[in-house]
Amino acid sequence: MRLLAPFVLCLAAATAACTTPGGLEREPMVAPILTSAEARDEFTFARAEVARVTHLALDLELDFARKSVGGTARLDIEAAPGAEEIVLDSNGLQVARITAPDGTPLPFSMGTPVAGKGEPITVDISPSTGSAQGLRSITVHYTAAPEADALQWLAPEQTAGGTHPFMFSQGQAINNRSWIPTQDSPGIRQTWEARITAPKPLEVVMSGLRLSAPRDLGDGRRVFEFAMDRSVPPYLIAVAAGNLAFRDIGQSTGVWSEPETLDRAAAELTDTPAMIDAAEDLYGAYRWGRYDLLVLPPAFPYGGMENPTLTFLTPTFIAGDRSLTGLVAHELAHSWSGNLVTYASWRDGWLNEGVTSYLESRISEVVFGETRAAQERALSFAAVEEAVAQMGAEAAGSALRTPAELDPMEYDSTITYDKGALFLHTVERIVGRERFDPWLRSWFDAHAFQPATSQMFLADLRQNLVRGDAALEERLRLDEWVYGTGIPANAARPDPAAFVAVDAASSAYAANRSLDAQAWGRWSAAERMRFLQTLPDALTAAELAQLDQTLGLSGTGNAEVQFLWLEAALRNRYEPAVPQAEAFLMSVGRNKFVQPLFQALVDQGDWGTPIARRIYAEARPRYHSFTRGRVDALLGVEG
Ligand SMILES: [Zn+2]
């Protein structure tokens, strides 16, 4: 049971600095709003300069029968003098009424829905409504629409245990407005607290600290209470409920999962305390109290989601040999890049993901050694080269800062994650770790719990690292990295030795189809992935059968290896792999795997499209709205 609140909660003192038990002065509660053009978020209806939410208090009941949540959200507000209204984001929320602190109903209107954005809720907070002058809090009484985008409700048969239902939320990017009426913009940071009622015996967990033991209402329901007293972008508010068990894996870290998965999950996560140590050594104290991980059922659409205090993880990271735990290093790293310092605009995706992928690599190097880190960097570099080659070096989409003409929600993850990390590896290589590491740490310190932009990142780097050194400025090509396209010429290329043995084996296979099963047995997961990624495009059924038989591909417990095998098989119309692909697509909802496998089928026209349609008809209800949206578009299915 997790009962501890390692830092003092001072939710009432909305704007005052609070003091931790250690006596350290806490940062002010209300994070600033950035007003620069670059910080503008075109995906919110909020007008934060008029009135903004500073704190959110949820009191909600999970309704598994209706697949919906409902209750109240009290919003604490900071308004400019004379402000008459506050605008909130909604996506399908059914609002019954909105009240002032004394219970007086407040006039409000729901705007017309805008595709991909939802609709505004405009609430009259002018003193003329009869409420007290200086209204500072409103309460929204509401229900989320069934099938709200952020929430996924799993039937018992979609869980490992098979007996109890499960639900979880995924807030990023702008899904949380489908279950929380707030200003859903990454630049409008808010503290929050929540009271969640759920049927027994389900356990509720959230991306904040649990305040007390669950309270039994005596009618088959229990109440759970949570709080997050660090201000966060609202997309980081997350909830999950299911038949969950907990196990400690370190002093302030542990794993939640279904009991059936707990042994395997805990064993796979034993390196987590070492990762936290490595990250703290590099980038300063972990500031969120506990670091727990929640291993979800396979329907989870992402690899992981960096929800504060509680990373949400796909079970597909469990390979049995800890070879895919780079994912954990990644989600942990977001505790600095993304959660502590957060992009204000979706156009700066690389500020969260590129910086985090760089941190992931540094943590991996400490925990798993230089060889693995070098191999992972080489895979990442190859991915950037391939992505840029595919889209063209002049393509606008290959810039780190998404240009205005492109939809920032349709970003290319290889650019955002891998090219972003490559930028930082490049700066690191040019200035040296002894200078770069302290600077990056100071960036996190200076902007902790605040929004940031590309412009701010470059300005800070110039002011505190380049310091007017014109020769260094020229070598770094900072603006070209962030605003330019393609791969700048100064990119830190990976160690050519990283895959020497594997690339020789690939060449041998390409030349005469020779396979070395013993070498394969010795290879790391990264080496196996490299080998499969460099297979010839065209393979015959006999060759695929030989690959499978010799390397044991269809029997692998490593989801990344299995995915690459299935992708190669489907691209070559290899019938014997179809049942395995179907089983994989029916159980795994991780979009990184699902979308490319359907793509591989669709690319095979007459052969693959009917197979894709048949599998998707069955699998679609099992996917999260994010994955569904991607595959719907691919197969031309109406959402
Ligand atoms: Zn990430």
Image (tube, helix red, strand yellow):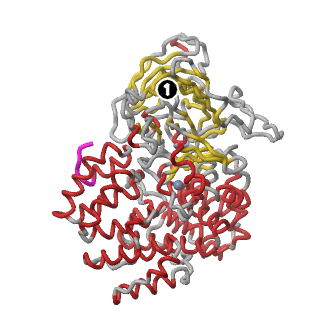
Name the residue type under label 1: Pro
- Position of residue 360 relative to residue 308, above or below, is below
Residue nearest the observer in this picture, 26 or 456:
26
What kind of element bears circle 1? strand
- What is the quadrant of residue 276 in the picture? bottom right
Residue 37 horizontal/vertical position (percent): 51, 48
Disc 1 packing (10 Å; few <14; some 14–19; many ≥20): many
| Residue farthest right in this picture | 23
Indicate left or right for 412 with 603 as reference: right
Residue 361 highlighted magenta (yes or no): no
In which quadrant of the rendered image does the C terminus lie? top left
Q: How would you classify the magenta stretch by its main secondary structure?
A: loop
In which quadrant of the rendered image does the N terminus lie? top right
Mark 1: is the Cβ under 8 angstroms from ligand 1? Answer: no
- Position of residue 586 relative to residue 116, above or below, is below
Question: Is residue 454 at all visible to an observer of this figure?
Answer: no
Q: Residue at x 48, y 41 (%)?
A: 171
Residue nearest the observer in this picture, 481 or 373:
373
Residue 567 horizontal/vertical position (percent): 33, 66
Residue nearest the observer in this picture, 182 or 367:
367
Residue 10 horizontal/vertical position (percent): 72, 30
- Residue at which label 1 appears: 199
Residue nearest the observer in this picture, 35 or 416:
416
Indicate left or right for 621 with 347 as reference: left
Residue 269 horizontal/vertical position (percent): 60, 55
Numbered range of the magenta stretch: 634-639
Question: Is residue 577 at all visible to an observer of this figure?
Answer: yes
